[in-house]
Amino acid sequence: MLDKIAKHFDFQQRALDLRAYRAEVIASNIANADTPYYKAMDFDFGAAMKSAEDGQGKLALAATAARHLAGSAGAGSTTNGADLQYRGAVQPSLDGNTVDMDVERGAFADNAMKYQSTLTFLNRRISSLNDAIKGGQ
């Protein structure tokens, strides 16, 4: 029974995980806005969601000893099915930094709004399931 309930919410859980990860990536871009030669990164949410939904995420490196490196950093790395890609510079800077604060703020606000709407949708589904369990009382 609990497996069916967990499977019922699996899609929203994956979406929330990817939205939270995208917020981390964008926050990292904003934090490095003044770092010379820093390249802004992002990922295609739709492709990452499809990859997570298919369950065909790329293989991760296996760490068999405490001294092994995690192996996930920089462009091309995969987390939750999200392939990080460098974002092209809208207005190139002299120090090689490709972070555009207007783009980052817009992406962060868009991502936060979609995260909140997914959370609201999930809360409504939980509420309707709770009503069904109680028998509509």
Image: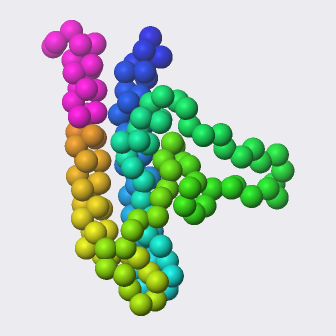
- Majority secondary structure in the magenta region: helix
Front one among 126 and 100 = 100
Residue depicted at 22% across the width and 43% down the height: 117
Q: Is residue 1 left or right of residue 117?
A: right
Question: From the viewer's perspective, is residue 87 above or below residue 133?
Answer: below
Residue depicted at 60% across the width and 40% down the height: 58
How many discs mark residues in the rendered view? Answer: 0
Range shown magenta: 121-137
Q: Answer whether residue 47 is magenta in the image.
A: no
Residue depicted at 23% across the width and 34% down the height: 121
Say if residue 30 shows up in the picture.
no
Colouring method of the image: rainbow
Residue depicted at 41% across the width and 65% down the height: 87
Say if residue 7 shows up in the picture.
yes
Q: Is residue 110 left or right of residue 77?
A: left
* Residue 5 at x, y percent in the picture: 40, 19
When asked about the image quadrant of residue 67, the answer is bottom right
